[in-house]
Image (cartoon, rainbow, N blue to C red):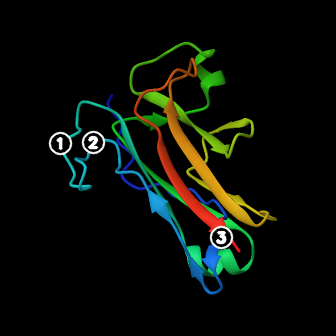
C-alpha cells in the first residue's frame, strides 16, 4: 500500500536579526526548481520545511519548524527493525552543529536559543537512517 502524508508540521524556535523582525531563509523544497515551483514528485519522497510564526517566536528566543512530507509514510524505524522498507521513513533534525534528533514528529520546537545565527537542517531518512531526499534548511538570527 502506498501512503502519502500531505501535511505535516515541524516546529523549531528561531529568532530575529533586528528587534521585532525575524530573518528566515529557506532552501527550495525537494522536488522544486530554483524558484520554488513544485514539480511532480509522486514517485519520489520529498519534504518541505518552513518556520511557523517566526516573528512571534523570535521575540521569545524560540523557533518552530513545520515539515510537510510527500511520497512516504512516517514510521518509527524500530517497527521495521531498522531495515529499509520502501515507502517508510522518519525525520532527522539538527540545530547548528548539534546532535541529530531522529523522530517521527513533523513539528518540533527549540527554546532558549542564544543570540546570533542558527540553522535547522531537516532530512527525510529511511529506517536505516540513510537520506531519502535532499535535506532542507531554515535559518534565523536571534537578536
Identify which residue is drawn at 70% across, 81% down. Answer: 59
Q: Which mark is residue 80?
A: none
Q: Place residue 90 in its image quadrant.
A: top right
Task: Please indicate whether residue 37 sits to the left or right of residue 134 in the image.
Answer: left
In the picture, the quarter occupied by the C terminus is bottom right
Distance from the alpha carbon under mark 2 to that under mark 1: 7 Å
In the rendering, at what x and y percent does residue 141 appear? 63, 66
In the rendering, at what x and y percent does residue 111 appear? 77, 63
Q: Which mark is residue 40?
A: 1
In the rendering, at what x and y percent does residue 55 appear? 58, 79
The foreground one among 129 and 5 is: 129
Task: Please indicate whether residue 88 sits to the left or right of residue 59 in the image.
Answer: left
Observer-side mark, 2 or 1, equals 2
> Pointer 2: what residue?
31
The answer to the question of whether label 2 and label 1 lie on touching residues, with beta carbons closer than 8 A, is: yes
Identify which residue is drawn at 74% across, 40% down. Answer: 98
The foreground one among 15 and 11 is: 15
Identify which residue is drawn at 50% across, 15% down. Answer: 84
Taking 53 as reference, is 95 above or below it?
above
Q: Residues within 10 Å of mark 1 (few under 14, many from 20)?
A: few
At mark 3, the secondary structure is loop
Q: Earlier in the sequence, mark 3 or mark 2?
A: 3
Q: Residues within 10 Å of mark 2 (few under 14, many from 20)?
A: many
The foreground one among 127 and 57 is: 57
Q: Place residue 20 in its image quadrant.
A: bottom right
Distance from the alpha carbon under mark 3 to that under mark 2: 27 Å
Identify which residue is drawn at 60% across, 41% down. Answer: 104
In the rendering, at what x and y percent does residue 5 appear? 39, 46
Taking 118 as reference, is 130 above or below it?
above
> Pointer 3: what residue?
15
The answer to the question of whether label 3 and label 2 lie on touching residues, with beta carbons closer than 8 A, is: no
Q: Place residue 78 in its image quadrant.
A: top right
Amino acid at each position: 500500500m502506498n501512503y502519502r502524508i500531505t501535511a505535516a508540521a515541524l516546529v523549531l524556535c528561531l529568532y530575529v536579526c533586528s528587534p521585532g523582525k525575524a530573518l528566515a531563509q529557506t532552501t527550495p523544497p525537494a522536488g522544486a526548481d530554483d524558484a520554488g515551483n513544485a514539480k511532480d514528485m509522486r514517485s519520489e519522497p520529498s519534504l518541505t520545511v518552513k518556520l511557523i510564526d517566526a516573528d512571534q517566536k523570535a521575540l521569545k528566543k524560540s523557533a518552530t519548524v513545520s515539515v510537510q512530507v510527500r511520497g512516504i509514510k512516517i514510521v518509527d524505524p524500530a517497527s521495521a527493525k531498522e531495515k529499509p522498507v520502501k515507502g517508510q521513513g522518519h525525520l532527522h533534525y539538527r540545530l547548528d552543529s548539534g546532535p541529530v534528533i531522529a523522530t517521527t514528529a513533523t513539528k518540533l520546537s527549540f527554546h532558549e536559543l542564544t543570540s546570533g545565527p542558527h540553522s535547522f537542517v531537516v532530512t527525510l531518512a529511511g529506517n536505516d537512517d540513510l537520506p531519502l531526499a535532499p535535506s532542507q534548511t531554515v535559518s534565523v538570527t536571534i537578536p
